[in-house]
Amino acid sequence: MDWKDTIAKVTSAAPLLGSFFGAPGTAIGGIVKLVASALGVEPSEEAIAAEIQQNPEALLKLKELESTHRIELEKLLLEKERIRLQDVQNARQRQTETEKSTGKRDMNLYVLAWFGVLGYLALIIYLIAFGLPKMTVELALMVGNLIGIVGGKYSSIYDYFFGSSQGSAHKTATIDTMMEKKGN
């Protein structure tokens, strides 16, 4: 079982706990140690994946872990979001302070942003105009990779200049969770 499958299983059993996992090696904080401790295995992604695959009771243990530590996990999730938003704010604040101190805009930022947007659009137009049917398999793979890379950068550029709805989604989920608790 690979790590993505493990995360999917953890998330299906314990969604809040699953939100702390990412790609291999990117689990947040001591979450791997916490999960490993609850499962009684060594604190490694491989050991956790093996235990979840071999032991049908493992997901039940993780559900109990989430239930027992729900408040602490929610606090950690809110802290994670606060740090992400602070990073975004710091980037925007740096730009504002630079513009105030120099009296002019940082053109590198805008040039780079426009190259990212135009590069993304150029790749899409290329695909529409010259089409996938004329491409070899190798070329299609290269163009697909380029679209993925440039599309990710396009998303970052858009989020930097216009914000992101991720914070709003987290806020809504947190409010829903709090309302559920009040109803119980």
Image: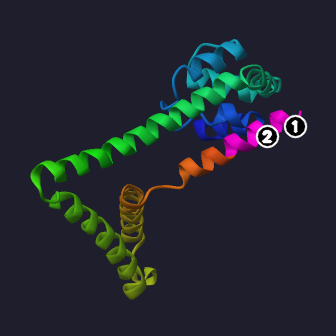
Q: Nearer the viewer, residue 131 or 182?
A: 182
Rendered residue at 70%/24% (across/down) = 71
To which residue does mark 2 refer? 179
Q: Position of residue 30 (x, y in %)?
A: 54, 19
Image quadrant in which you'd find residue 70: top right
Label 1 packing within 10 angstroms: few (<14), some (14-19), many (20+): few
Q: Amino acid at mark 1?
A: Gly
Q: Position of residue 173 (x, y in %)?
A: 68, 45
Specify the segment rendered in magenta: 173-184
Q: Position of residue 135 (x, y in %)?
A: 39, 78
Rendered residue at 61%/45% (across/down) = 170
Residue 183 is tagged as 1
Q: In the displayed structure, would residue 111 be above or below residue 26?
A: below
Image quadrant in which you'd find residue 62: top right
The quarter in which the N terminus is drawn is top right
Rendered residue at 31%/49% (across/down) = 92
The quarter in which the C terminus is drawn is top right
Specify whether 170 is left or right of 150: right
Q: Element type at marker 1?
A: helix
Label 2 packing within 10 angstroms: few (<14), some (14-19), many (20+): few
Q: Are marks 1 and 2 in contact (CB under 8 Å)?
A: yes
Q: CA distance from mark 1 to mark 2?
A: 6 Å
Q: Element type at marker 2?
A: helix
Q: Amino acid at mark 2?
A: Met
Q: In the displayed structure, would residue 85 be above or below residue 95?
A: above
